[in-house]
């Protein structure tokens, strides 16, 4: 069931509001924020600039994310993937208008390498992006807490994520809020391309 377009979760602060969707007029901002914050993974696939943002936007499912806003400005976003739907719905058809057939094929191959298909009882975090000036202010923690509420409401009992070795600060946060490392995995032979060598899979079981 799709959430109502004006559906909100509890406020993070008196001025920062959390929503369980991406408003239509924030899609371009979300693409720019995603590309910036998740550059290690996304820039090798999409590149940078207006074409990259447009290509990324075409695959967004605005109802599979949690967003944070302050004063009508998008300050954070968390993409969600479940067994039935995901925030990033990338296909050859969404990529071809921007990269052509051959360019779309190798980009799909890279994305498939990074893709994790969630189990039926899981919500997978498909990326957390927060504006630099809002980091360290509880926005990321608030987005994840809102995801836990979302997951429970959808009958899911596990949240899973991957954190790259180039982001130890994020891994420390995830451990602090109850995630446990399951195993590490390498991205060989694409480590040089992506800018990180391995990632740690972490899970949190919801009560």
Image: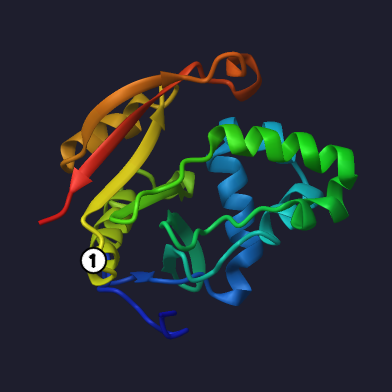
* Depth check, front residue: 97 or 82: 82
How many badges with numbers are in the image? Answer: 1
Vertical side of 82 occupied by 102: above or below: above
Estimate the x, y position of residue 51 in percent, counting from the top left. Answer: 81, 50
* Depth check, front residue: 207 or 129: 207
Q: Which residue is mark 1?
A: 149
Q: Mark 1 falls on what kind of element?
A: helix
- The residue sitting at 24% across, 29% down in the picture is 181
Q: Residues within 10 Å of mark 1 (few under 14, many from 20)?
A: few
Vertical side of 157 occupied by 12: above or below: below
- The residue sitting at 66% across, 33% down in the picture is 110
- Which image quarter is the C terminus in? bottom left
Residue 136, visible in the rendered structure: no
- Which image quarter is the N terminus in? bottom left
Estimate the x, y position of residue 68 in percent, counting from the top left. Answer: 41, 64
Res 202 → quadrant: top left
Residue 54, visible in the rendered structure: yes
- The residue sitting at 69% across, 31% down in the picture is 44
Horizontal side of 25 relative to 19 (left or right) equals right
- The residue sitting at 63% across, 55% down in the picture is 31
Estimate the x, y position of residue 154 in percent, counting from the top left. Answer: 29, 69
Coloring scheme used: rainbow
Residue furthest to the front in view is: 120
Horizontal side of 196 relative to 165 (left or right) equals right
Estimate the x, y position of residue 59 in percent, counting from the top left. Answer: 65, 59
* Depth check, front residue: 36 or 194: 194
């Amino acid at each position: 069931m799709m959430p109502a377009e004006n559906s909100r979760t509890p406020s993070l602060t008196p001025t920062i509001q959390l929503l369980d969707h991406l408003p239509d007029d924030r899609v371009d901002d979300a693409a720019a924020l995603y590309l910036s914050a998740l550059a290690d993974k996304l820039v090798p696939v999409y590149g940078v600039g207006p074409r990259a943002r447009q290509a990324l936007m075409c695959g967004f499912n605005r109802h599979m994310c949690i967003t944070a806003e302050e004063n009508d400005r998008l300050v954070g976003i968390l993409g969600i993937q479940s067994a039935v739907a995901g925030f990033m719905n990338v296909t050859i058809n969404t990529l071809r208008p921007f990269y052509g057939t051959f360019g779309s094929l190798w980009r799909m191959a890279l994305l498939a390498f990074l893709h994790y298909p969630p189990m039926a009882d899981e919500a997978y975090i498909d990326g957390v992006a927060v504006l630099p000036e809002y980091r360290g202010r509880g926005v990321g923690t608030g987005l994840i807490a809102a995801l836990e509420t979302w997951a429970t409401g959808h009958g899911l009992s596990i949240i899973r994520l991957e954190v790259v070795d180039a982001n130890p600060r994020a891994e420390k946060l995830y451990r602090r809020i109850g995630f446990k490392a399951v195993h590490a995995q390498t991205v060989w032979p694409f480590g040089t391309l992506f800018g990180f060598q391995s990632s740690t899979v972490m899970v949190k079981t919801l009560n």
